Image (tube, rainbow, N blue to C red):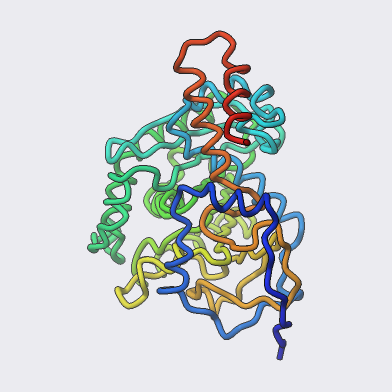
Amino acid sequence: MHVIKQRKKIVLTEAQKQMYASEKLMNFRWVAKMAATYSPYILSPEDIADQKLFTELAEIGQFTELAYTNAVPVEFLFKNLDLLMNSKFPLEGYNALHGSVLVSEFFGRVAHLHGYVAYRPKTKQLVVATSGTSTAIQAIQDLRTLWHRHKSRRGFVHSGFWQLYKGIRPFILEGIRKGFKEHEDIEELVITGHSMGAAVSYILLLDQILVSNEIIPADLPIKLAAFGAPRPGDDNLSRYYQELIGSYRSKYGDAAFSEHLVKAYNDGVPALPPLFLGYRHFTQSPLYYDHMRLYHIPPSDCEYTLFHVDAEKSLEYPRGGHNYYNGRDQEMLLRRLGWLEKSLTKGDTHWQETYLERVKKHSR
């Protein structure tokens, strides 16, 4: 039995105090306190995931986070990657984006949900990234927790997530087809999303990718990277999803499909909608991100949201929360993109200088 070490009270640095004072987005720490439960299983060093997996998911997470941009067109960002990855610019540290090519950008017919499809030449991956909740009208869809019978007749899905998915489905499928047409050396399809976007990603797999090979080459490996996902459906639909995965792997091999649901310390979103309403997660062996480490969660505890960890904690993002996955402050990205938007809308040909002036102003 592991014993949790007593830790001293964390004293925030001045930079951390400023970081938390700058928060504007919901981080759902209060939901974690009110609705989430701790597993009796204590994660130990034996449960730590391989560093290679941590790095891989952190890189995919860069594409995931970029889907949140409503302020600046993704096309502009991809055309100016080299510049925008410089120090103090919005994509500083987002090195996995280097050399990537935008295939398509889309806004859904329901609540204007944003997403895009991109090609990564370095890894030969086609990435489908869907944004999480970024507007009030999208938040309303999150709250529509009434059941909708899935077309498979094998269970029920969250009605709000289903409507959001239907609104972007034709654009996603068109983007995937275009990606395979334009890039013949694709070796893996990556489906990714954060928060609501992660739930929509599950529904995409359930509705199209795992049940039909009409839009992707046969036996092409598929990878799901879901960060901070809420529960998308009921227990019956979860079992159906697992059956589809089993069938896909039986047909094309165990490596043909890999799924990674990452929960995080102090993030209450994976506890929603609550279990007592009948909702369940679909991934049976999730991961847990805690202070710069990634842990494997045993299948028996897959529905728990929070875990005690028997290990020393990194102090980089000590409070955890919904927008601090993969060792990054996602709010900083969105703040910088907002400053970039204001610099571009003035039509100033020297927008780089204008942007840096804004950064300087907000850093005082």
Question: Residue 179 appears at what percent x and percent y?
Answer: 52, 29
Q: Nearer the viewer, residue 342 or 263?
A: 342
Please tell me whether residue 356 is drawn above or below residue 189 in the rendered image: above
Q: What residue is drawn where x is 67% and y is 34%?
A: 92
Q: Nearer the viewer, residue 191 or 57?
A: 57
Q: Quadrant of residue 106?
A: top left
Q: Quadrant of residue 167?
A: top left
Q: Quadrant of the C terminus?
A: top right
Please tell me whether residue 177 is drawn above or below residue 58 in the rendered image: above
Q: Quadrant of residue 70?
A: top left
Q: On the picture, is 5 further left or further right than 290?
A: right
Q: What residue is drawn where x is 37% and y is 75%?
A: 275
Question: Residue 325 appears at what percent x and percent y?
Answer: 60, 54
Q: Quadrant of the N terminus?
A: bottom right
Q: On the picture, is 170 further left or further right than 293?
A: left
Question: Residue 100 appears at what percent x and percent y?
Answer: 63, 29
Q: What residue is drawn where x is 57% and y is 36%?
A: 126
Q: What residue is drawn where x is 41% and y is 74%?
A: 34
Q: Nearer the viewer, residue 257 or 75?
A: 75
Q: On the picture, is 291 further left or further right than 239?
A: right
- The number of callouts visible is 0
Q: Nearer the viewer, residue 342 or 295?
A: 342
User: Residue lying furthest bottom in this view?
Assistant: 1
User: Residue lying furthest front in this view?
Assistant: 364
Question: Residue 225 appears at what percent x and percent y?
Answer: 56, 52
